[in-house]
Image (cartoon, rainbow, N blue to C red):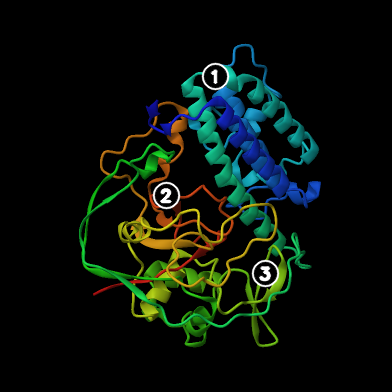
Amino acid sequence: MRTRLGLSPTPGALAERLAGVRALSVALVAPLSDADASVQSMPDASPAKWHLAHTTWFFETFVLRDFVSGYALHDERFPFLFNSYYEAEGRRHARDRRGMITRPGLEEVLAYRAYVDAALADALPDLPEAARELVRLGCHHEEQHQELLLTDILHLMSENPIEPEIWPGARKVPVAMPGPIGWIEHEGGLVEIGHDSPNFAFDCEGPRHQALLTRHAIADRTVTNGEWAAFIADGGYTDPRHWLSDGWAWVKAEGIDAPLYWEKRDDVWTRFGLDGRRAIDPAAPVTHVSFLEADAYASWAGARLPTEMEWEAAAASHDADGGNQLDTAGPVEPRPSASGPAFFGDVWEWTGSAYRPYPGFTPADGAVGEYNGKFMSGQFVLRGGSCATPRGHVRACYRNFFYPHQRWQFTGVRLAKDV
């Protein structure tokens, strides 16, 4: 049966998907100590332990509590600790104080996950379709948190002066820089964008609707580290001409002079990653830049950021499962572009579009209706997924969104221009 979230999977297929998603989350935290998993490095990030517990709370609350008769909560205190922003679910622990939850410990949180996983496995065969849809939503929700988990761990380790390697990777020989950016032209006109298929999508991806594009061109690849280094060398961070007012104020107030995790050592630009500190690969996509930086770079390059409609129109014919995305637990990093246009993986791509509802958008009923719609203010849309996005999670109509100054995610830049 086709529903708002698409074709509802069979219990067996859903159980297999659920088990895979849940196992990957546990594998991602395997290198962490209890202390690693408990610390919160900034208000925008959450402790690894909290991510593990919150995604479990989602299944326990919206599936087991609401659809399984006689289900007993693992711990009556956990809803207060591990609710995120669902006002309909009552009071919750302050987001910027999540790092103070030293107990329950990591082992207890993993036990909580095992308890809920066992209950879900028992309940799945008999769950009504509405509950199965929520299990599927919970899988996609947990995949979002897997990416947040990796980026939050990276930020945490970057705050440690010894810059530990979580997943040591092989030292790579830099490859040749790609050739000049190529441009994919679009004649403009009416296009259809947004979700309209039997497959899963979040509510903010629809309804599908028409958008009018003017004639334009979009770059066939993202901006590289080497190109960004040239921007820096040309005074990109010291010339106010290229910056929005908010961006220039941010640069001056925060002392921003390079992408996040970049540092010049012995006159060489380096970056910190989950595999430790290394020299930047000039041919790899630049990452960890804010919308404010992306917009300034585009101005410096004589271009602009694409709208999300232009991006989707260009990406719709490309394989969303292609590119460099997260397959297993291990080191993740953007890598040099393959030949030919690629729109998915490596880095999320900032667009010039504000995150607002599409015409005809209505949030879902109940607490899960708070999932996306309430955040449609003051943020910008990103497209395409990253090297930390679980493979199979994104699609051409997928809308990610962050505030203009945020850059701890794997965020990069694809240019566009009017022609």
**Residue type of the residue flagged with mark 3:** Phe
Q: Position of residue 225 (x, y in %)?
A: 54, 77
Compared with 12, 23 (above or below) is below
Circle 2 residues within 10 Å: few <14, some 14–19, many ≥20: many
Compared with 257, 320 (above or below) is above
Q: Position of residue 383 (x, y in %)?
A: 43, 57
- Mark 3 and mark 2: Cα distance apart in space: 28 Å
Circle 1 residues within 10 Å: few <14, some 14–19, many ≥20: some
- Mark 3 and mark 1: Cα distance apart in space: 45 Å
Question: Which quarter of the picture shows residue 248?
Answer: bottom left
Q: Which residue is mark 3?
A: 272
Q: Position of residue 376 (x, y in %)?
A: 38, 46
Report whether residue 372 is seen: yes
> Which secondary structure lies at badge 1?
loop
Q: Nearer the viewer, residue 55 or 242?
A: 55
Earlier along the polypeptide chain: callout 3 or callout 1?
1
**Residue type of the residue flagged with mark 2:** Tyr
- Mark 1 and mark 2: Cα distance apart in space: 28 Å
